[in-house]
Image: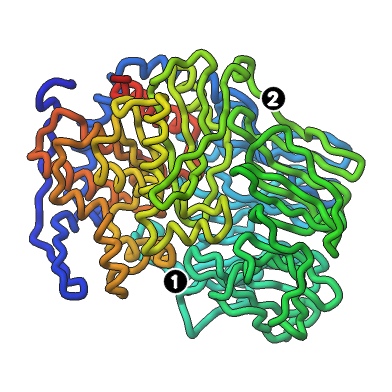
Amino acid sequence: MDGHAAFSYPAARRDDVVDDYHGTMVADPYRWLEDPAHADTRAFVAAQNELTLPYLAGLPGRAALVERMRKTWDVPRMSAPIARNGVKVWLHNDGLADQPSIMVEDADGNRRVLMDPNTMSDDGAVAITQTSLSTDGSVLAFNVAEAGSDWQVIRCVRTADGSDLPDEIRHVKFSEVTWHRDGFFYSRFPAVDPNSTETVRNQTVWYHALGTEQSADCLVFENAGDPDPGYTARVTPDERFLVLVEWIGTSRANGVLYRSLDDDRADWVRLVEPGKGQHVVLAHIDGEFIVHTDVDAPNGRIARISLDDPGTYIDVIPESEHPIAGAGAAAGGLWIMSLEQASHRIRLTSLTGEDRGFIELPEPGTVSEVNGRFGDREIYVGFESFLRPPSALRWTAEGSGWFAGTDPQAGFGRILVERDHAVSTDGTEVGMFMLHHETSAFPAPVELYGYGGFAIDLTPMFNPARLAFLESGGVVVSTNLRGGAEHGEKWHAQGMLGNKQQVFDDFVACANRLIERGVATRDSLAIRGGSNGGLLTAAVMLQRPELFGAVVSQVPVTDMVRYQLFTAGRYWTVEYGDAAQDRAAFEWLMQYSPYHRALDADVFGLPPLLITTAETDDRVVPMHALKLAAALQHAAGGLSERPLLVRIETRAGHGLGKPTSKLIEESADIFAFILHHCRPG
């Protein structure tokens, strides 16, 4: 299908829809694709899949990739245990199960499966996304999501015998579960249609007493004057205070409120308003909160804040050159996770900052979680790297070792990992990891991966699909662009709002570095990213189409003037800007908005493109991918020699809880697409 005009695209109607943004008229001919339930949208989705799926299924080497990925995926993977009163629970996947099961270990060390979500559906699309163990270890609360939705249901099970409790908490999204006494705090929204793409507001905090109906839950906090903030409830380790994290969109500059748990009638007290900086309360000691903050410290610091003088910060651990990526109170002291060359390290200190050494990690990698209470002797660490599957370390003062886990598979030792840097347009060095087989010949097919936003770090993580790609002669490059927080909040700020173009420039600099080194040619270089990274790859493709041999844009954000009108989109205005409310934001967003640039793009110079989305993605709604595909296919006149395709998954969302079987099929499509189109010239 690679001959002249090999691809004939389904016709998509163009409506005469024009909006006025600050005096500029902006066309939106595919507005109708914003309604996922409309018959025309469903017909468009079906027609696109009828074109895309057979093409992908017929790619040479795809069947071999599926077979090899089943083997690279078939390794045990687990989370770090949560321990309470001698009981431990964790998530565990033996290898190819669609979803991990919940495991439990009792005080005598006996292990068994507590719950298997694979029995909850026929297609593996029901996932457990979060667990929280009661203080006495007798009850586990767990969040259940279906088809990848952000909407979740909280249920409970007894750890002793696996019996289900009748408790069922609905209307939950973006919520933690925090136990206190005989129940837990949680956050919820008003009841809405879970299939709606409209934004939701008015998140409130509630207390649920175990064994009661949700209708009997006690309202703990609501902000009747402002529907926009979100709230997360946490209890201090000494159980003296209930702390509310008040978040505005995805901004890390959160507010904090607290009230005493010793008096049910106690008033809420404001510790800090949103916007000042990040504040994570780690512990309460003698009338002071110990807080992880970036106020006057872009790389983060640990400080004491007196409840009587909340405006004064006294350093416990001052800011250093290595950003703090997380911190907590456990085992009688503090743990501080820092970032060094885009990998994690965990330092231990006393409550007053005296050094207690490090938790030794086996190689540069990612700490996914750190679990332990202040009064415990043990700390459990979830760890993974490019070649090590997710595993769990157990630390005590006497030493550390594996609680459970899997060493890298035989043969992975022949995969080399190196650190390199590119120089961006402003002279700044941008780091990247490069993985390749020791026998790889350069130039080679290359997957250049990026994200660059929301202060999210791209640290080394285990990806079974990439291992199969590496064995096929490919090279994997993972970039640490501006917009992430690999170098602290300043690094993030340099890639957000009006600085977003810098992220794209960083990515292009990484591409040029690979070409200059001879690792790739322009024909063999593919770019891939998802969500904000899908925006990245779509934008860079339209700005520098001649630089790439293929583009994969997964669940992308592409309509930068209307994204805030759908589901979670309103949370991102602090990162991107709001075109409707701010003229300056409109101007910078229109400079790179992929959908709008595609409407009049010269598509004949574009590289092969694969866009992916999912029908039930309620994080980045499918309209972004569908409108981009429709615009590009129209600009091509309905025909093109190179593919401009969109793949729409069913019974899946943004990625959360996607079944293993779907991950393998999708990954085989993506890497077969890259290998087919990216041949060194």
Disc 2 element: loop
User: Residue 68 vs residue 11: left or right?
Assistant: right
Q: Is residue 248 visible?
A: yes
Residue 213 appears anywhere in the view: no
Q: How many marks?
A: 2
Q: Provide residue 211's location: percent of width, then percent of height.
A: 69, 62
* Residue at mark 2 to residue at mark 1: CA–CA distance: 45 Å
Q: Nearer the viewer, mark 2 or mark 1?
A: 2
> Toward the viewer: 415 or 614?
415
Position of the N terminus by quadrant = top left
- 73 vs 669, left or right, is right
The quadrant in which residue 401 appears is top right
Question: Residue at point 16% right, 59% down?
Answer: 28
Q: Quadrant of residue 400?
A: top right
Q: Tell me: 463 left or right of 608.
A: right
In terms of sequence position, does the residue under pointer 2 or pointer 1 come before the other?
Answer: 1
Residue beneath the point at 68% across and 39% down: 383
**Residue at image mark 2:** 407
Residue 516 in the image: x percent, y percent?
39, 30
72 or 147, nearer to the observer: 72
What residue sits right under mark 1 in the picture?
201
Sort mark 2 into few (<14), some (14-19) or many (20+) by Cα contacts within 10 Å. few
Q: Quadrant of the C terminus?
A: top left
Asked if residue 630 is positioned above or below residue 336 in the image, the reply reads above
Q: Amino acid at mark 1?
A: Arg
- Which disc, if any, is residue 286? none
Q: Residue at x 45, y 34 (%)?
A: 123
- Residue at horizontal 60%, vertical 15%? 411
